[in-house]
Image (spheres, rainbow, N blue to C red):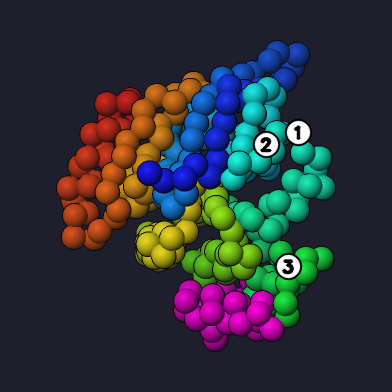
Amino acid sequence: MKNTIIKTELMCKSFISDGEVNNVIKNMDLEIYEGDFTVIMGSSGSGKSTLLYSISGMDEISTGKVYFDGQNISNLKEKHLSRLRKEKLGFVFQGINLIPNLTVYENILSPTYKLKFDKKDTDNRINYLLEKMDLTTQRKKFPNQMSGGQKQRVAICRALINNPKVLFADEPTGSLNSSQGQSVLNIFTDIHKEGQSLVMVTHDLKAAIRGNRIIYLKDGRIDGDLRLEEYEEATYQEREETVYKFLKDKGW
């Protein structure tokens, strides 16, 4: 039995627009398990990214509770949430969001500022990540000197610098071409096999089949929950057919 790393209880997230309340996430009970590669899917407007931001402490929920590693984070002050995100979580976004005037090395190092990380250990960690992501020769370059795929790999290094309990990814291949996207998905598969917990929002079938669990949202509620074996390239076609049928049955 896997440990629960994230749990929600009757979680709601609403926005007010033009005086009207828009209930995006509705009374959601959800458990995310340690060591899983959890994929969140759904049609446009179903609440995928809102759910990701709500369970990661990036966004304040409206009502209900969110627990991370047994701690209720729903009512934490922003400074405590910020520290939690820096110390225990990692984030990868479609927009990549590297700091343009920092080198690759400095971008990866940036989440450790103001945290008590051992300098030598951190340097060793960065060197390890650069080698793992095939970026060793890029360490002194700036983001504008790199391809989109290289920049996203730098962003993954930055997200992993603190050995996060959970790595969150919001459409991480959305701005990449197919070969660059494949490279990023291979990295996610590798780190998941090493024990990294991941939660990824995607609209891409090729990305979704890398997960071992797919949660399908519809109108702010969980409409489907597909469990899969760990990803193996040898079973790609069979896996693709299983996931496609699940999504088609849900109206994707």
Work out whether 4 lies above or below 195: above
| Residue type for callout 3 | Thr
- Specify the principal SS of the magenta part: helix
Badge 3 local density, few (<14 within 10 Å), some, or many (20+)?
some
Residues drawn in magenta: 120-146
Q: What number is the disc on residue 112?
A: 3
Cβ atoms under marks 3 and 1 closer than 8 Å: no
| Residue type for callout 1 | Asn
- Is residue 116 located in the magenta-colored stretch of the structure? no
| Residue 104 percent coordinates (x, y) | 64, 75
Q: Tell me, yes or no, if residue 53 can be seen here.
A: no
Which quadrant of the structure image shows residue 110?
bottom right
Q: Is residue 5 left or right of residue 195?
A: right
Which residue was labeled with disc 1?
Answer: 75
Which residue was labeled with disc 2?
Answer: 72
Along the viewing direction, whichever of 219 and 11 lies nearer the viewer: 11
Which quadrant of the structure image shows residue 24?
top right
Along the viewing direction, whichever of 145 and 201 lies nearer the viewer: 201
Cβ atoms under marks 2 and 1 closer than 8 Å: yes
Q: What number is the disc on residue 41?
A: none
Residue at left 54%, top 75%? 129
Counting residues from the start of the chain, the first of labels 2 and 3 encountered is 2
**Element type at mark 3:** helix
State which mark lies toward you, 2 or 1: 2
| Residue 115 percent coordinates (x, y) | 78, 66
**Most distant residue in the top direction:** 20
Badge 1 local density, few (<14 within 10 Å), some, or many (20+)?
few
